[in-house]
Image (cartoon, grey):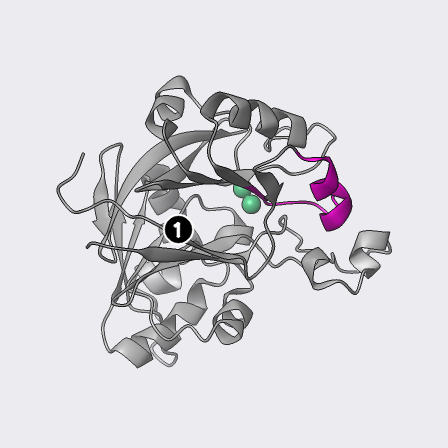
Amino acid sequence: MSGEARVIVLGCGTSTGVPAIGCTDPVCLSDDPRNKRLRPSILVQNEASSLLVDTGPDLRQQALVHGIRRVDAVVYTHFHADHTHGIDDLRVFNFLMKRPIPCYAFPNTVNVLRRNFSYIFGNSPDTTGFRPQLTLYEVEGTPFEAGGFRVRPLDLEHAGMRVMGLRIGDFAYATDCNAIPPASMEALRGVRVLILDALRHREHPSHFTVEQALEVVRELKPERTYFTHTHYDLEYYETNRKLPPGVEMAYDGLTFEIRPEEQGEG
Ligand SMILES: [Zn+2]
Ligand SMILES: [Zn+2]
C-alpha cells in the first residue's frame, strides 16, 4: 500500500446518536446538519480498498449516504452496541464483493462478538436467513494488515475495558476512552491528524471530557485534532469557537487525506 488515502467520518455522535430519541434539548432540535451525528464509525479508503472501523446501528444509512460499495476489512474498537449492532448489514458487502470479510479485534472484543452474534459466528440452527460471512481474527499489540492498510493497534482504557485505538501512518483514531496508557501515548507521538473521544464538559466514567481531551492534545500536539463521540451537550459552532487552534469538532461526512504507512515500514 502506498500513496494517499482518505478518512471519512461516517458518524461522530455518542451512543444515542444526536438527536437522541425524544430529546428536546436545543441541539437535538437543531436543523443544522453539523448537530446531527450518527453513531461513531470511520472509513479509511484508497483507490483499491476500504477499511471500516466499527459497525454501529447506523451502518446502513452511513453506507447509503456515502455510496460505500466495498468493505475489504473491519476493525472493531470494542464490543459496545453503538459500535457493533449494525453488523448484520455487512452481508450486503458479501453480496457485492462475493467473499467473506475479515474482521479484527482484541481478544476481549472477539469473545463478546462471538457470544452476542452467535447466529453469525456460531452454528445457528436457523438456516433460513442469510447471515453475514465474516472471519474474526484476534489481534494483540503488534501491527497488522487490514484491508491493505497497516494498522498499529493501541490500548485505550474505557472505564477499565480494553478498547483498540488505531494508528495508520500519520493518522490515529481514539474513540471511547477515558485514559490512554503511557505506551499508547508513546505510540501516538508524531501523529499528524487525531480523532479523539471528547464526550462533553461534565465528567463521565468512560469517556474523556473536552478538557481531558485537550490535555492529551497539549501533550501530543497533532497538527489537527477532531473530537468524536460527542454528546448533544456540545453544540457544534459554540464548542468550536472555544477550542484552541488546530482542534475542532468532527462532523458526519468530514473527510481528510492521510498518509498511510508503507508496508514493511516501522
Ligand atoms: Zn461508543
Ligand atoms: Zn464504548
- Residue 196 placement (x, y as % from top left): 52, 38
Looking at the picture, does residue 70 appear above or below residue 25? below
Report x, y in % for residue 197. 56, 38
Image point 57% across, 22% down: which residue?
Answer: 215
- In the displayed orientation, state which residue is furthest to the front: 245
Q: Nearer the viewer, residue 210 or 6?
A: 6
Count neighbours of disc 1 (C-alpha within 10 A) and say few if under 14, some if 14 to 19, many if 20 or more. many
Quarter of the image where one finds residue 101? bottom left
Does residue 203 lie above or below 241 as drawn? Answer: above
Q: Amino acid at mark 1?
A: Leu
Residue at the spot x=46%, y=33% of the render? 222
Q: Position of residue 201 (x, y in %)?
A: 73, 32
**Does the magenta segment cover residue 227?**
yes
Which stretch did the figure color magenta? 226-243
Q: Secondary structure at mark 1?
A: helix
Percent position of residue 134, x then y: 29, 63
Relative to the observer, which residue lies in front, 255 or 129? Answer: 255
- Can see residue 238? yes
Q: Quadrant of ligand 2?
A: top right
Residue pointed to by mark 1:
113
Quarter placement of the C terminus? top left
